[in-house]
Image: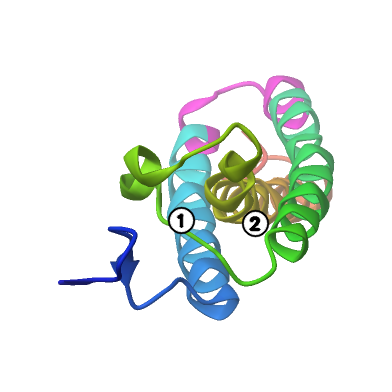
Amino acid sequence: MALDRDGVMLPRLRPSDVARRGVMYGLLGAVLLAVAVVSITGHSDRREFLAVASVVGLFGAIQFVIGAGFWWASAGDIRRLRDWNTLTSQAASVTVVGPVFLRAGLFLLVLGAAALGLYQLVDAAPYGSWLHG
């Protein structure tokens, strides 16, 4: 891996790569969410769990907007979390926090959307089906 003159790993992070990884983590989390929902036996308990889990999407949207703002504020000097030791001031931490918030925000946004979709499926499931509980 190449380093620039400041010791920062090259190539720099790109928003599309960070977003792709955040969405991938969210989809993997959605699979785990589906497994957790199937393990809950009561219908009302399933609906309540999914309703609470869907609120995570709101936090993800807020975190995504904050991460995009940090990314914009860092003006192209985006660093990986592994480059933390190359920071020279407190204000430079924005260059590391932007991608972290962006990735985590997309993860939570996808997970919340999956929980909302599963909530709609469980709510509309006919009585006696395996999805109803």
Front-lying residue, 12 or 101: 12
- Disc 1 residue type? Tyr
Front-lying residue, 93 or 27: 93
Residue sitting at x 67%, y 49%: 105
71 left or right of 5 in image: right
Looking at the picture, how far across and down is residue 18, in whole percent? 51, 67
Q: Is residue 27 above or below residue 42?
A: below
Q: Which mark is residue 106?
A: 2
Name which of mark 2 and mark 1 comes first in the sequence: 1
The residue under label 1 is 25
In the image, the segment drawn in magenta is 37-47
From mark 2 to mark 1, how far is it between C-alphas? Answer: 9 Å
Front-lying residue, 110 or 106: 106
Q: Is residue 94 above or below residue 106?
A: above
Residue sitting at x 77%, y 45%: 57
Please report contact status of discs 2 and 1: CB closer than 8 Å, yes or no: yes
Residue sitting at x 58%, y 52%: 95
91 left or right of 33 in image: right
- Disc 2 residue type? Leu
